[in-house]
Image (spheres, rainbow, N blue to C red):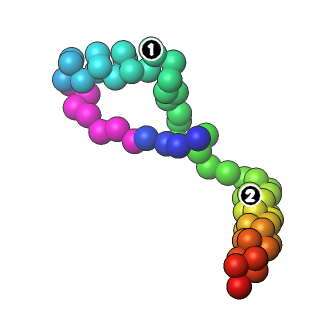
Amino acid sequence: MCTVTLSYDQNNALARRKLADLLRTGLFVQKDIETQTRTEAEEEEHRKEVEAFIHTSKTNMANIISRYL
């Protein structure tokens, strides 16, 4: 999931209306900043997943590259 940050004039009625329309489509969800922070356990799990992904990618690419050498 990606995050989009919007800046707008909260006193501008058109901007508020367009933002409300955008959120009403259901394609976007408004998040609080506090919900975006990860715990240490989540960070550690994420780091391990990234390392496993990179290891697997390198292993797979080595097999592909070796075919052409």
Magenta-colored segment: predominant secondary structure: loop
> How many other residues sit within 10 Å of disc 2, few (<14), some (14-19) or many (≥20)?
few
Residue on which the image places disc 1: 24
Residue at 76% x, 53% y: name it: 42
Q: Tell me which segment is drawn in magenta.
A: 5-11
Residue 40 in sight in this render = no
Residue 13 included in the magenta stretch of the image: no
In this picture, residue 32 sits left or right of residue 59: left
Closer-to-camera residue (20/54):
54
Above or below — where is 40 with respect to 35?
below
At 24% from the left and 24% from the top, the residue drawn is: 15
How far across and how far down the image is residue 66, in percent? Answer: 76, 80
21 horizontally vs 2: left or right: left
In the rendered view of the protein, which quadrant contains the N terminus? top right
| 11 horizontally vs 49: left or right | left
Amino acid at circle 1: Arg
* 37 is higher (above) or lower (below) than 57: above
- Quarter-of-image position of residue 4: top left
The spot of residue 59 in percent (x, y) is 80, 72
Question: Label 2's element?
Answer: helix
Residue that mark 2 sits on: 46
Residue displayed at 36% across by 15% down: 21
Residue type at numbered disc 2 = His
Residue at the spot x=50%, y=23% of the render?
A: 27
Q: On the image, which quarter does residue 41 sit in?
A: bottom right
| Whether residue 68 can be seen here | yes
